[in-house]
Image (cartoon, rainbow, N blue to C red):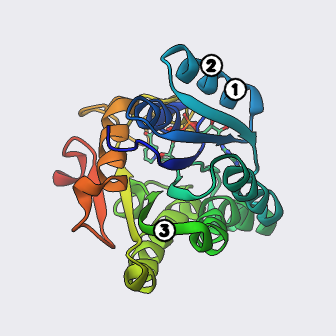
Amino acid sequence: MRFTGKTCIVTGGGSGIGRATCLQMAAEGGNVVVADLHLDAASATVSAIAAAGGHSIAVAVDVGDTAQVQSVIAQAVAQYGAIDVIVNDAAMMTFTPIVETVESDFFHVLTTNLGSVFFFAKYGAPHMRPGSSFVNLSSVHAHATTPNVVPYASSKGAIEAFTRGFSIEMASRQIRVNAVAPGAVDTPMLWNNPNVKSGAEKVTGAIGKPEDLAAAICFLASDDAKFVNGTTLIVDGGRLDSL
Ligand SMILES: NC(=O)c1ccc[n+]([C@@H]2O[C@H](COP(=O)([O-])OP(=O)(O)OC[C@H]3O[C@@H](n4cnc5c(N)ncnc54)[C@H](O)[C@@H]3O)[C@@H](O)[C@H]2O)c1
């Protein structure tokens, strides 16, 4: 029960890896703030947590909107008093060659994926006690990628650099900051990816379950990882090992 008495905000908690992380943290005693663009999806996660005897609230948020992020943090503090874990899971992709990419679309991806990590860091950290931690979702696309997803790959590479730098800033407050880089994981984001559908991105090796990623995220978020800081844990079933 690694999260007993702890408040855990998980963005993207309505689906896939975020949902599995919410369920695991609640099963281990956490009070979970399930934050998602789609309130109905977040509410479904809350219902599943309640059915298992856990505690959570659903909050609607566009993580790329600083005012909405600040509202999530305020609601978490109002409900539970402090914040112990922030998992930045929500993200988006576009599928367009760079020379055809509309400028606003490029920055929309950057703001949603990377800006959200900044917003939750800036406004969440003041409410976090020593022993708290951040876990940011990167991707194997930060390390090896395919055509037409440059904004997404750029955001994920930057998230790993952000994680490293912010961990240094938080060290004196004993707040850890780490990232997880998933490989192919059985979620809607994987199967809706046009490059996966067309075969441009080959998903021939191991495909992880959302629970496999939740296990890694919960490890990094918990005291089990108290000597792990500023790092990115690649959780891809070995996909990046062979080209
Ligand atoms: N599934 C994979 O194969 C894979 C691989 C590498 C990295 N990842 C990363 O893992 C994370 C989770 O992905 P997933 O596969 O579970 O996706 P998913 O599509 O199953 O779930 C993503 C959730 O994020 C929410 N969301 C999207 N935009 C949002 C916004 N602006 N504000 C708030 N919520 C928003 C969606 O509503 C959805 O509930 C992402 O950061 C993704 O980049 C996934």
16 or 124, which lies in front? 124
Above or below, 53 relative to 135: above
Number of residues whose C-alpha sits closer than 10 Å to that of mark 1, classed few (under 14), some (14–19) or many (20 or more) = many
Q: Quadrant of ligand 1?
A: top right
Q: Give the amino acid at mark 2.
A: Ser
Above or below, 184 relative to 122: above
Horizontally, residue 23 falls left or right of residue 203, namely right
Q: Give the amino acid at mark 3.
A: Arg
Horizontally, residue 198 falls left or right of residue 208, namely right
Specify the quadrant that holds the N terminus. top left
User: Nearer the N terminus, badge 3 or badge 2?
Assistant: 2
Image quadrant in which you'd find residue 58: top right
- Residue 187, position in %: x, y? 48, 30
- Residue 119, position in %: x, y? 67, 69
Separation of marks 1 and 2 at Cα, in angstroms: 6 Å
Q: Going 31% across and 31% down the picture, which residue do you hit?
A: 207
Number of residues whose C-alpha sits closer than 10 Å to that of mark 2, classed few (under 14), some (14–19) or many (20 or more) = some
- Residue 6, position in %: x, y? 47, 48
Please tell me the numbered disc located at residue 47: 2
223 or 134, which lies in front? 223
Q: Which residue is mark 1?
A: 43
Separation of marks 3 and 2 at Cα, in angstroms: 28 Å
Image quadrant in which you'd find residue 223: bottom left
Q: Are marks 1 and 2 in contact (CB under 8 Å)?
A: yes
Q: Which residue is mark 3?
A: 129
For mark 1, give the secondary structure.
Answer: helix
